[in-house]
Image (cartoon, rainbow, N blue to C red):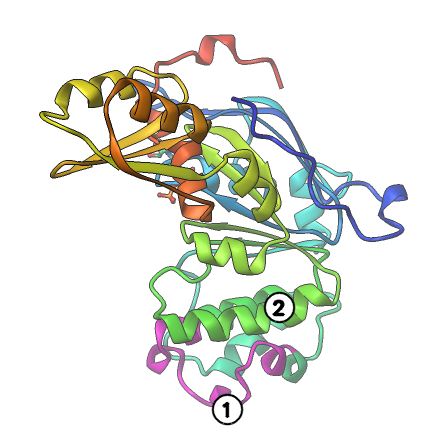
C-alpha cells in the first residue's frame, strides 16, 4: 500500500534554496562484536524544504532518533546520503545552522537558568542576546532559578532556549515533551509555535499523534526503519482511509476473525464479546463481506481519526531491530 503523498507546499521563494534536509536511501546498521547487527534505518528518502514544520511519528524503535542523529551529524549513515541545508550534516551543524533539543542530559544543576544560557552563549561567535532567547522560551520569570530546581518541562524549555542561541535555520527536536504533563506540553508548544511561525524549519520526533496533528504541517510516519506514510494529517487520514468497521457476529467469532486477518488490506481485528471491530483500507469491502457472507448485524463504519490511520498504516509493524537482517543489500554511501 503506497501511502506516501506530496508534502505541503514550501513557503514562497524556497525553490532556489537547498532543502533543509535531503535523505536519499538512508540506511543505518549498528554492529557490535558478538551480537547480531541492528538495522535501525532501512532506506529512508526524505526531502524537507526550508520553512516546513515536520513531525516524524512512529512507535518505539521505528528509527526516528537514528534518523535525526544522522541529520545532526552525530552518527554516519551506513548507506545512502544525507545533506542538510546543502551541506554535509556535520558542516551545517559546525556552521551554527542547525540546533537540537534532545531528550535529556546536558544541563548543570547548580547553575541558574540565566547563567546556563550565558555560558552556552559564550561558546558561539555571534549568539542571539541572552535575554531575548530567555523571553522567547518563556523563561523570564525563572531566569534566577537553579536548574536543579526547575521541573522537567522547564528544563526542556531551557534546552529550547539554548538551541535558539545560534539562531539556527533548522531546529531538530527529539521527543521534546517526553515526560511533561499536559499543561507543560501545551506551554512548550506555544513557545515553539511562535518560533515556527517566524519561518524556521522544525523537525520533531514524537509518539504523540495529537502533537503531530496540532503542530506539524507535514507528518512523516516511520515504522520498521522506513517511511510508511508522508503528508498532511488530512492526507494521511484520507489515504489510510482510517475507517473501522464494527458489527455483531452470530456464534463463535474465532473462524471469522481468522478469515478477516488473512485479508491483506486488514490492519487490525479486535473482538469484544460478540462484536468484532476491523481496521482496513477498504471499509466498504469489509462491510460487504461481513453483511453478505458472515451474517453480521448492527454494522457501523466509523471514519477518520488520525489514530485509526496510524494503526492502519503501522498496524503490527515490528521495530526495525526485529525485522530480518538485509544489511548486505545496503547501497554504498
Ligand atoms: N547505538 C545503538 N546500538 C545498537 N542498536 C541501536 C543503537 N541505537 C539505536 N539502536 C536500535 O535501533 C532501533 C531504532 O532505534 P531508534 O532509537 O532510532 O528508534 P526510535 O524510533 O527513536 O524509538 P523511540 O521512540 O523508542 O526513541 C532500535 O531497535 C534500537 O534499539
User: Quick check: 158 left or right of 252?
Assistant: right
Whole-percent x, y for residue 124 in the image = 68, 65
Q: Which residue is mark 2?
A: 193
User: Quick check: 27 left or right of 35?
Assistant: right
Q: Which residue is mark 1?
A: 141
Compute the Cα span from label 1 to label 2. 20 Å
Q: Residue at x 42, y 87 (%)?
A: 145
Whole-percent x, y for residue 56 in the image = 52, 44
Whole-percent x, y for residue 223 in the image = 43, 32
- The residue closer to the viewer here, 210 or 243, is 243
Asked if residue 213 is positioned above or below residue 145 in the image, the reply reads above
User: Quick check: 17 left or right of 166?
Assistant: right
Q: Are marks 1 and 2 in contact (CB under 8 Å)?
A: no
Residue 91 included in the magenta stretch of the image:
no
Q: Residue at x 9, y 25 (%)?
A: 252
Upstream in the sequence, badge 1 or badge 2? Answer: 1
Q: Residue at x 53, y 31 (%)?
A: 227
Query: Comparing marks 1 and 2, which lies closer to the viewer?
Result: 2
Amino acid at each position: 500500500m503506497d501511502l506516501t503523498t506530496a508534502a505541503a507546499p514550501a513557503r514562497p521563494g524556497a525553490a532556489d534554496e537547498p532543502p533543509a534536509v535531503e535523505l536519499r536511501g538512508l540506511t543505518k546498521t549498528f554492529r557490535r562484536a558478538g551480537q547480531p547487527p541492528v538495522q535501525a534505518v532501512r532506506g529512508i528518502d526524505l526531502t524537507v524544504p526550508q520553512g516546513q514544520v515536520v513531525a516524524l511519528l512512529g512507535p518505539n524503535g521505528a528509527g526516528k532518533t537514528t534518523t535525526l542523529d544522522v541529520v545532526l551529524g552525530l552518527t554516519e549513515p551506513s548507506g545512502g546520503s544525507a545533506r542538510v541545508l546543502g551541506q554535509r550534516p556535520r558542516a551545517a551543524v559546525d556552521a551554527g545552522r542547525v540546533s537540537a533539543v534532545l531528550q535529556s542530559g546536558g544541563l548543570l544543576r547548580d547553575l541558574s537558568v540565566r547563567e546556563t544560557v550565558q555560558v552556552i552563549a559564550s561558546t558561539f561567535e555571534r549568539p542571539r542576546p541572552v535575554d531575548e532567547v530567555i523571553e522567547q522560551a518563556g523563561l523570564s520569570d525563572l531566569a534566577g532559578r537553579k536548574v536543579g530546581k526547575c521541573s522537567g518541562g522547564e528544563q526542556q524549555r531551557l534546552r529550547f532556549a539554548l538551541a535558539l542561541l545560534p539562531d539556527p535555520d533548522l531546529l531538530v527536536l527529539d521527543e521534546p515533551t517526553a515526560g511533561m504533563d499536559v499543561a507543560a506540553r501545551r506551554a512548550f508548544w506555544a513557545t515553539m509555535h511562535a518560533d515556527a511561525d517566524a519561518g524556521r524549519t522544525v523537525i520533531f520526533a514524537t509518539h504523540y499523534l495529537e502533537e503531530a496533528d496540532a503542530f506539524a504541517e507535514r507528518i512523516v510516519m516511520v515504522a520498521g526503519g522506513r517511511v510508511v506514510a508522508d503528508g498532511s494529517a488530512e492526507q494521511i487520514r484520507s489515504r489510510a482511509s482510517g475507517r473501522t468497521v464494527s458489527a455483531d457476529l452470530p456464534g463463535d467469532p474465532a473462524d471469522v476473525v481468522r478469515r478477516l486477518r488473512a485479508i491483506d488490506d486488514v490492519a487490525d481485528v479486535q473482538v469484544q464479546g460478540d462484536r468484532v471491530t476491523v481496521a482496513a483500507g477498504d471499509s466498504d469491502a469489509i462491510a460487504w463481506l461481513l453483511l453478505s457472507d458472515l451474517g453480521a448485524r448492527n454494522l457501523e463504519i466509523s471514519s477518520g481519526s488520525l489514530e485509526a490511520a496510524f494503526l492502519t498504516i503501522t498496524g503490527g509493524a515490528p521495530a526495525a531491530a526485529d525485522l530480518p537482517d538485509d544489511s548486505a543489500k545496503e547501497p554504498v554511501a
